[in-house]
Image (spheres, rainbow, N blue to C red):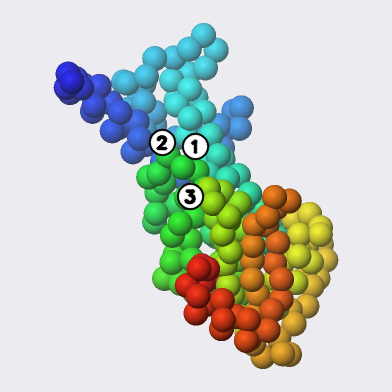
Amino acid sequence: MDKVPLALEELQIWFANHLTRTFRDIGEFNLPNYSEAVNQEIRSRIAPGPTLSAEQRFGIYNQQYWWRLFVLLQEAYPTLVRLFGFRDFNTLIAEPYFLRYPPNDWFLPHLGTHLMQWISEEYDEEDRKLLINIADIDAAYERLYHAINPESALFELNADFFSFRSSLLEHTVNHWQQNDLPKLDCKKGTYYFILSRTEEGVFYESIEKAYFDEWSASKLLLIG
């Protein structure tokens, strides 16, 4: 196999490094505004188009990179999005997460592989434990949905996060920005659930501790 020309390799590295940078200042066509130093660097590498400048052409890729990541993570973690709202989810969760763990897998459902780890390590707010539980359940739904073979996952929780999740998903993200969140039931102490995929989709079921112990001992299930 012929070696990639050095100039092309250098351009690709430069493009990727700048593509993944965040931006705050928005200009014409809702595209990023860059500093003059960055604009000059872009112009030295990218030609302008018939209607767009070099920096605007590059800005489209920069913008779409982040928008695409935000949307995919929102779809994979619908409960977290409802807790935060779109804007706060993007700025407080998605953006710092992707800066810490940039995507490096072609399989898009793997985007959130390190999200719970990031929450544990980087998220310092009082609701961190709530977020970890919710993210774990959202991730299990995503994992089972894309699993090649039917699988199940067991959960031992200190609150009924599954009913809480179901109540949140009954309404849109914007609804929960205007209304109080549903109450989280934690009176029972310990809750046991099994999450399974069938031909109709992924569903959860509350189970007794004896069944939880029996199934977990069988080692045939994933532990959430």
Mark found first going from the N terminus, 3 or 2: 2
Q: Is residue 82 above or below residue 70?
A: below
Counting from the top left corner in percent of width and height, residue 27 is at 57, 33
Mark 1: give few (<14), some (14-19) or many (20+) Cα within 10 Å: some
Q: Type of residue at label 2? A: Leu
Mark 2: give few (<14), some (14-19) or many (20+) Cα within 10 Å: some
Q: Which mark is residue 19?
A: 2
Whether pointer 2 and pointer 1 mark residues with C-beta atoms closer than 8 Å, the reply is yes
Q: Type of residue at label 1? A: Tyr
Q: Quadrant of the C terminus?
A: bottom right
The Cα–Cα distance between marks 3 and 1, rounded to whole angstroms, is: 13 Å
Q: Nearer the viewer, residue 45 or 111?
A: 111
Q: Nearer the viewer, residue 76 or 46?
A: 76
Between circles 3 and 2, the one closer to the viewer is 3
The Cα–Cα distance between marks 2 and 1, rounded to whole angstroms, is: 7 Å
Q: Quadrant of the N terminus?
A: top left
Counting from the top left corner in percent of width and height, residue 64 is at 53, 34
Q: Type of residue at label 3? A: Leu
Name the residue that disc number 3 marks.
111
The residue tagged with tag 3: helix, strand or loop?
Answer: helix
Q: Is residue 58 above or below residue 163?
A: above
Name the residue that disc number 1 marks.
65
Counting from the top left corner in percent of width and height, residue 12 is at 30, 28
Q: Is residue 149 left or right of residue 118?
A: right
The Cα–Cα distance between marks 3 and 2, rounded to whole angstroms, is: 17 Å
Which residue corresponds to the image point at 60% horizontal and 44% vertical from the top-left? 71
Q: Name the image quarter holding residue 15.
A: top left
Whether pointer 3 and pointer 2 mark residues with C-beta atoms closer than 8 Å, the reply is no
